[in-house]
Image (cartoon, helix red, strand yellow):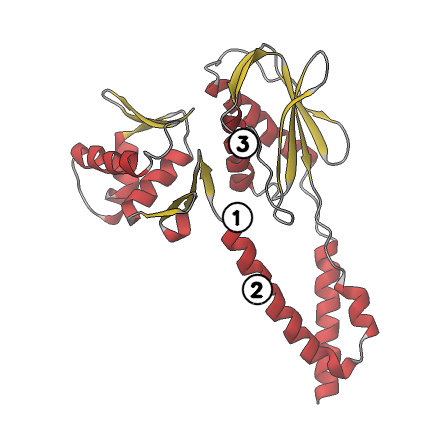
Amino acid sequence: MLFGSSILITSVLIFAIAFINNKKEIPANHVEVILRDIGHQLLLSAKDSSSRVLPVKKLNDNKYQLSFQNNFGFISDTLINLVQRTFQKNALANDYIVNLKNCKQKETVFAFEINSQTGDLTPCRGRALELGCYVIEIELLKKNTFNFYWYLLLIIPLAVVGFYRKVLFRKKEEAAAVLDNNDYIQLGNYRFYTANNLLKIEHQSITLSDKETKALKIFAENINQIVEREKLMKEIWEDEGIVVMSRNVDVLVSKLRKKLSGDHAIKFINVHGRGYKFIIE
């Protein structure tokens, strides 16, 4: 009985592993669309809504280059936050390196790395990059995954059940650790944990109410864009059958502004007659 179960589990695992290894990679044209959106949002943050993002160049299997029609300047945190937010939203990559280079000398003027294995490297935060011609190179890092297929072929079938349980337990622990480290949205110096109704800055944790979390998530998905009062009222209250006044939105934004006051680069701008604009400078 145990032998038969071991053989069955081994067969299922081998089939599953073969299926995972044969999964198609993300199409290059889809990656290019995401990167063009990053370029577009970066220009908007630099208050440039007219010049073009030039065609994305694929430098090799994992590296892409963004270039722009005109010169522009921005804050380094803007690029870090924009890439993190866009990659998380589109599930493009967890590990990557971004290099900002000047056009003429091709010298790196700013770079950062997001790596779930070795830890993030984000030097020069808050640095103002002067007006100039820049290209952005983004390299998507591939994970070195352990191949269970060959290991399973070498073990004694009778030991498969115990081995499988051990591997399953370890995978759950690793998944929990990755979730703890990466399941957040970077907003300036804050980490926004939407699933936990929590903001973290340095060693301080700030609890959010359900409505504050809903509102901040809407703003985080629409940085530098006007969020209409009607949208906030509908998605935060009216979808739950609660009718509220516009004043409720003002009170909610005021609470968020206070809880995010630890980072002066984060601002809520009142757009008269329309709503609010969430800005990270």
Of the two numbered discs 2 and 1 on the same chain, state the one appearing first in sequence.
Answer: 2
Q: Secondary structure at mark 3?
A: helix
Q: Residue at x 41, y 31 (%)?
A: 222
User: What kind of residue is marked 1?
Assistant: Asn
Q: CA distance from mark 2 to mark 3?
A: 28 Å
Of the two numbered discs 1 and 3 on the same chain, state the one appearing first in sequence.
Answer: 3
Label 1–label 3 contact, CB within 8 A: no
- Vertically, is 41 above or below 175? above
Q: CA distance from mark 1 to mark 3?
A: 15 Å
Q: Residue at x 24, y 43 (%)?
A: 238
Q: Quadrant of the N terminus?
A: bottom right
User: Which numbered circle lies on residue 80?
Assistant: 3
Residue on which the image places disc 2:
173
Q: Nearer the viewer, residue 145 or 181?
A: 181
Q: Quadrant of the C terminus?
A: top left
User: What kind of residue is marked 3?
Assistant: Ile
Q: Residue at x 57, y 35 (%)?
A: 122
